[in-house]
Amino acid sequence: MTLAPTLTTLDALLAGQSATVIHLAPGNTAEAGVDVSRRLMELGFVPGERIRMLKRGVPGGEPLAVRVGDSTFALRRFEAALISIQPE
């Protein structure tokens, strides 16, 4: 019996956990006036890339500090929700 990999979105990842990017959903251009998914891909959030959730802001858990490669980015929750991941 083969178990399907557990997929979730980056906004659900706990601080200290790592994951692999699986897919980016199309972003709503009305949110920020730019193509959010394209911007995230340009930052390095591409399928197959390993990422790590470093910390969540207090209060409300926003922004999210995420490490991609050697870079650290602060994402808003709606941006992180566009990134499908497979937790490690």
Image (spheres, rainbow, N blue to C red):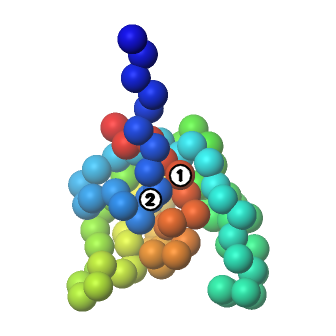
Question: In terms of secondary structure, where does tag 2 sit?
Answer: helix
Q: Mark 2 or mark 1: which comes first in sequence?
A: 2
Q: Residue 59 placed where, x, y %?
A: 24, 88
Residue at x 39%, y 79% (from the top left corner): 63
Q: Residue 69 placed where, x, y %?
A: 48, 49
On-image quarter of the C terminus: top left
**Which circle marks residue 42 in the picture?**
none
Residue at x 42%, y 16% (from the top left corner): 2
The answer to whether 3 is drawn above or below residue 62 in the figure is: above
Instruction: Tell me which corner region of the image, top left, top right, bottom left or bottom right, holds residue 74.
Output: bottom left
Q: What amino acid is found at the position of numbered circle 1 in the picture?
A: Ser
Left or right placement of residue 6 versus residue 82 in this view: left
Residue bearing the label numbered 1: 84
The answer to whether 34 is drawn above or below residue 42 in the figure is: below
Question: In terms of secondary structure, where does tag 1 sit?
Answer: strand
Residue bearing the label numbered 2: 10
Q: Residue 1 placed where, x, y %?
A: 39, 11
Whether residue 52 is visible to the viewer of this picture, yes or no, is yes
Most extreme residue toward the top, as rendered?
A: 1
Left or right placement of residue 38 versus residue 24 in this view: right
Residue at x 28%, y 50% (from the top left corner): 17
Q: Residues within 10 Å of mark 1 (few under 14, many from 20)?
A: many
Q: Residue 83 placed where, x, y %?
A: 55, 57
The answer to whether 48 is drawn above or below residue 41 in the figure is: above
